[in-house]
Amino acid sequence: MALMDFIKKQFIDILQWTEEADGTLAWRFPMAEMEIQNGASLTVRDSQVALFVNEGTVADVFAPGMYKLTTQTLPVLTYLKNWDKLFESPFKSDVYFFSTRTQLDQKWGTPNPITIRDKEFGIVRLRAFGIYSYHLTDPKLFYQKISGTRDSYGREELEGQLRNTMVAGLTDLFGESGVPFIDMAANQDEFGKAMFAKAAPMFAEFGLALDSLVVQNVSLPEELQKILDQKIGMNMIGDMQRFTQYQVANAIPEAAKNEGGMAGLGVGMGAGVGFGQVMGQAMASAAQGMNQAAAPVASVSADEVVATLEKLHGLVEKGILSQAEFDAKKAELLKKLT
């Protein structure tokens, strides 16, 4: 009966992995009831590593190449199985193959905004995303900490862990950098390098090597982005008083073409206050600002007075200023010539 069982057993004489499934990081050779023969051939292809495990204990590791399994090529396994000089054939052992190919174009990003203290805006919430690549370097460590005794372990199963590891480092990095958000766009390469340095040791703990990390975008939530856009616009405008005058001057010709346009313009600019009053206040503020800029000299040149009067007269002709308002302004300007 024992002889018949021995004859029925299947013996393995070739061990190899063709990596048919893309994205598989670890794969266990299907042993079932089979055993490995003395002198069996082990083929480890480029971008692969093979690992022999005896009763849960990691034994021999094989780099790419072709091997004949003997006591010389399996020294650790020979020791664990208490083989002396003779190779016991056949024998059972778990054999795992690992892919060391570079895993390209892996996505990372912040699932939720990261709250930091910004020099410009105070407390803000940031989002960031990018890509990274890595490869497996230590099959023993990866087996012990990640893949274990499973038949196979895929790249997608590891994605969440790696992404969360990087995002955790990103939170600390943003807080430690002290770089205002407004300057982050110009420093994305530097942030990528800093993130790489922070994340690489975390990858190494899993038996992986981080090959590259790119920060593609750093952004604010939509509501804060609108505020930033307004701030940028105000900074670009600079002198709001001059900008308001410029807008009014450009809006007058268009409004004058449409019936009721001047009234609509008055309502929009004055927010319920008469447009003539708004224009009078704007002109008074402009004159006051011009006086302050020219202090301590209170007078203005005749050319400036004439130019201002011509502009005001044009507003009278368009019905924007009354004659009384024009006369009052004219008298005020003429006094500055004395």
Image (cartoon, rainbow, N blue to C red):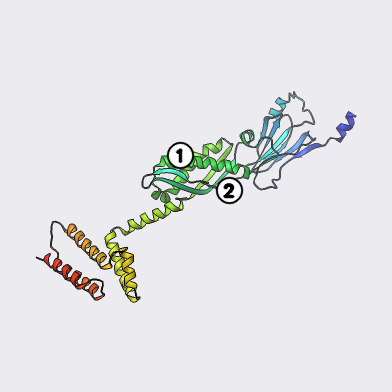
Name which residue type carries label 1. Answer: Asp
Q: Is residue 156 visible?
A: yes
Name which residue type carries label 2. Answer: Leu
Label number found at residue 41: none
Choose mark 1 or mark 2, whichever is in front.
1
Q: Nearer the viewer, residue 2 or 50?
A: 2
> Gap in Å between the C-alphas at discs 1 and 2?
25 Å
Residue 8 horizontal side relative to residue 323, left or right: right
Q: Residue furthest front?
A: 272
Quarter of the view holding residue 137 = top right
x%, y% of residue 141? 61, 34
In the depicted structure, whether residue 213 falls above or below residue 79 = below
Label number found at residue 172: 1
x%, y% of residue 270? 30, 64
Residue at the spot 44% in from the left edge and 49% down from the top edge: 188
x%, y% of residue 22? 66, 48
Residue at the spot 77% in from the left edge and 26% down from the top edge: 86
The residue carrying pointer 2 sits among few (fewer than 14), some (14 to 19) or many (20 or more) residues within 10 Å by Cα, namely few
Secondary structure under badge 1?
helix
